[in-house]
């Protein structure tokens, strides 16, 4: 972001020049990324869901893909799901005509 027309930006002090919401974002992703985000969505509130909900479907797909090769414990550790959730997903896969429980052992 080092353009001649933005030299004044060096004077910006996030602690005093930005509101609390911007300071929180700056603390996580840095000033330059925060300004890019604000420029990309001017005057538009941006709500960011918990990454758990965003990534849940990818984790489920991982469990179903690797359910025959990895133990439920390993799958739980890899995904952050409980072992109970892993067993539930694997049972649902079996009920849907996927692989049988014997092939998991």
Image: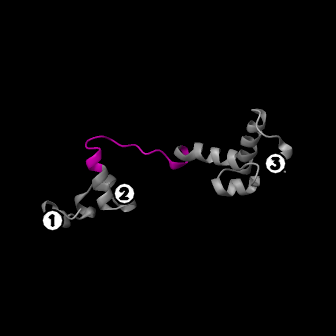
Which of the 4 quarters of the picture holds residue 23?
bottom left
Q: Residue 91's x, y, as percent?
A: 77, 39
Q: Mark 2 — residue?
A: 24
Which picture quadrant has residue 64? top right
**Is residue 97 magenta-colored?**
no
| Residue at the spot of label 1 | 7
Up/down of 98 relative to 83, above or below: above
| Chief SS of the magenta region | loop
Picture coordinates of residue 27 (x, y %)? 37, 62
Q: Secondary structure at mark 3?
A: helix
How dense is the environment of label 1, judged by Cα within 10 Å: few (below 14), some, or many (20 and up)?
A: few
Q: Marks 3 and 1: which is nearer the front? A: 3
Name the quarter where the N terminus is drawn.
bottom left
Residue, disc 3: 104
- Which x, y percent locates residue 34? 31, 55
> Which residue is drawn at the image coordinates 75% and 32% (left, top)?
96
Which label's residue is closer to the chain start, 3 or 2?
2
Q: Secondary structure at mark 2?
A: helix
- Residue range corresponding to the magenta coloring: 38-53
């Amino acid at each position: 972001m080092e353009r001649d027309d933005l030299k004044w930006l060096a004077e910006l002090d996030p602690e005093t020049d930005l509101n609390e919401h911007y300071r929180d974002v700056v603390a996580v992703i840095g000033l330059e990324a925060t300004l890019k985000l604000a420029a990309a969505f001017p005057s538009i509130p941006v709500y960011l869901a918990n990454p758990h909900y965003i990534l849940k479907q990818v984790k489920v797909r991982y469990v179903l893909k690797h359910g025959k090769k990895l133990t439920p414990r390993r799958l739980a550790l890899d995904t952050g799901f409980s072992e109970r959730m892993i067993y539930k997903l694997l049972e649902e896969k079996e009920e849907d005509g996927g692989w049988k429980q014997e092939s998991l052992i």
